[in-house]
Protein backbone atom coordinates (compact mmCIF):
# COMPACT_ATOMS: atom_id res chain seq x y z
CA UNK A 1 0.00 0.00 0.00
CA UNK A 2 2.78 2.44 0.86
CA UNK A 3 4.48 1.84 -2.49
CA UNK A 4 1.31 2.63 -4.43
CA UNK A 5 0.74 5.80 -2.40
CA UNK A 6 4.31 6.93 -2.97
CA UNK A 7 4.06 6.15 -6.69
CA UNK A 8 0.77 8.07 -7.01
CA UNK A 9 2.20 11.03 -5.15
CA UNK A 10 5.30 10.94 -7.32
CA UNK A 11 3.20 10.82 -10.48
CA UNK A 12 1.06 13.75 -9.32
CA UNK A 13 4.16 15.76 -8.52
CA UNK A 14 5.69 14.89 -11.90
CA UNK A 15 2.52 16.04 -13.68
CA UNK A 16 2.48 19.32 -11.75
CA UNK A 17 6.15 19.96 -12.45
CA UNK A 18 5.62 19.19 -16.14
CA UNK A 19 2.91 21.88 -16.22
CA UNK A 20 5.25 24.36 -14.58
CA UNK A 21 8.12 23.50 -16.92
CA UNK A 22 5.83 23.87 -19.93
CA UNK A 23 4.79 27.36 -18.82
CA UNK A 24 8.39 28.37 -18.12
CA UNK A 25 9.49 27.08 -21.52
CA UNK A 26 6.74 29.06 -23.23
CA UNK A 27 7.78 32.13 -21.28
CA UNK A 28 11.43 31.79 -22.24
CA UNK A 29 10.52 31.34 -25.91
CA UNK A 30 8.56 34.57 -25.97
CA UNK A 31 10.67 36.86 -23.81
CA UNK A 32 9.89 39.82 -26.03
CA UNK A 33 6.14 39.35 -26.25
CA UNK A 34 4.21 39.03 -23.01
CA UNK A 35 6.95 37.37 -20.98
CA UNK A 36 5.58 38.85 -17.79
CA UNK A 37 2.22 37.20 -18.44
CA UNK A 38 3.88 33.85 -19.15
CA UNK A 39 5.93 34.02 -15.96
CA UNK A 40 2.79 34.90 -14.03
CA UNK A 41 1.09 31.79 -15.44
CA UNK A 42 4.12 29.67 -14.55
CA UNK A 43 4.13 31.09 -11.05
CA UNK A 44 0.42 30.38 -10.68
CA UNK A 45 0.93 26.79 -11.90
CA UNK A 46 3.76 26.30 -9.42
CA UNK A 47 1.67 27.72 -6.57
CA UNK A 48 -1.25 25.47 -7.53
CA UNK A 49 1.04 22.43 -7.64
CA UNK A 50 2.53 23.26 -4.25
CA UNK A 51 -0.91 23.69 -2.69
CA UNK A 52 -2.13 20.41 -4.20
CA UNK A 53 0.95 18.61 -2.95
CA UNK A 54 0.59 20.08 0.53
CA UNK A 55 -3.08 19.07 0.67
CA UNK A 56 -2.33 15.55 -0.50
CA UNK A 57 0.52 15.14 1.96
CA UNK A 58 -1.69 16.43 4.79
CA UNK A 59 -4.45 13.96 3.89
CA UNK A 60 -2.05 11.03 3.49
CA UNK A 61 -0.20 11.80 6.73
CA UNK A 62 -3.48 11.93 8.64
CA UNK A 63 -4.42 8.52 7.23
CA UNK A 64 -0.99 7.08 8.08
CA UNK A 65 -1.14 8.55 11.59
CA UNK A 66 -4.52 6.90 12.22
CA UNK A 67 -3.25 3.57 10.90
CA UNK A 68 -0.06 3.69 12.96
CA UNK A 69 -2.00 4.64 16.09
CA UNK A 70 -4.41 1.76 15.60
CA UNK A 71 -1.55 -0.70 14.99
CA UNK A 72 0.33 0.56 18.05
CA UNK A 73 -2.77 0.09 20.23
CA UNK A 74 -3.36 -3.37 18.78
CA UNK A 75 0.30 -4.48 19.11
CA UNK A 76 1.91 -2.44 21.91
CA UNK A 77 4.94 -4.70 22.41
CA UNK A 78 5.82 -4.66 18.71
CA UNK A 79 5.35 -0.88 18.60
CA UNK A 80 7.62 -0.37 21.61
CA UNK A 81 10.24 -2.67 20.08
CA UNK A 82 10.13 -0.83 16.75
CA UNK A 83 10.46 2.50 18.55
CA UNK A 84 13.45 1.24 20.55
CA UNK A 85 15.15 -0.06 17.39
CA UNK A 86 14.56 3.25 15.61
CA UNK A 87 15.97 5.20 18.56
CA UNK A 88 19.04 2.95 18.72
CA UNK A 89 19.61 3.38 14.98
CA UNK A 90 19.35 7.16 15.32
CA UNK A 91 21.83 7.21 18.20
CA UNK A 92 24.16 5.01 16.15
CA UNK A 93 23.98 7.42 13.22
CA UNK A 94 24.74 10.39 15.45
CA UNK A 95 27.72 8.63 17.03
CA UNK A 96 29.04 7.55 13.63
CA UNK A 97 28.68 11.08 12.26
CA UNK A 98 30.55 12.56 15.21
CA UNK A 99 33.38 10.03 14.89
CA UNK A 100 33.78 10.69 11.18
CA UNK A 101 34.15 14.46 11.65
CA UNK A 102 37.77 15.61 11.45
CA UNK A 103 38.98 17.38 14.59
Image (cartoon, rainbow, N blue to C red):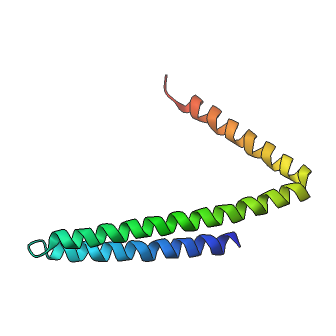
Q: Give the image location of residue 86, x and y in percent.
A: 74, 45
Q: Can you say which quadrant of the picture contains the N terminus?
A: bottom right
Name the one closer to the observer, 81 or 66: 66
Residue at the image position 58 percent from the left and 35 percent from the top? 97
Give the left or right position of residue 35, taking residue 63 as reference. Answer: left
Residue at the image position 69 percent from the left and 36 percent from the top? 91
Give the left or right position of residue 35, taking residue 59 as reference. Answer: left
Q: Give the image location of residue 22, x and y in percent.
A: 30, 77
Q: Give the image location of residue 17, x and y in percent.
A: 39, 71
Q: Quadrant of residue 94?
A: top right
Q: Residue furthest left?
A: 32
User: Where 9 sits versus 84, above or below?
Assistant: below
Name the one closer to the observer, 33 or 6: 33
Residue at the image position 17 percent from the left and 68 percent from the top? 36
Q: Quadrant of residue 18?
A: bottom left
Residue at the image position 60 percent from the left and 62 percent from the top? 58
Give the left or right position of residue 80, taking residue 18 as reference. Answer: right
Q: Residue furthest top?
A: 103
Give the left or right position of residue 66, taking residue 61 as reference. Answer: right
Count of labels in the image: 0
Amino acid sequence: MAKSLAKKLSNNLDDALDDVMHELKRASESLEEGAEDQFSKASAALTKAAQALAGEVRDRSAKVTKTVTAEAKEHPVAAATALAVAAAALVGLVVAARRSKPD
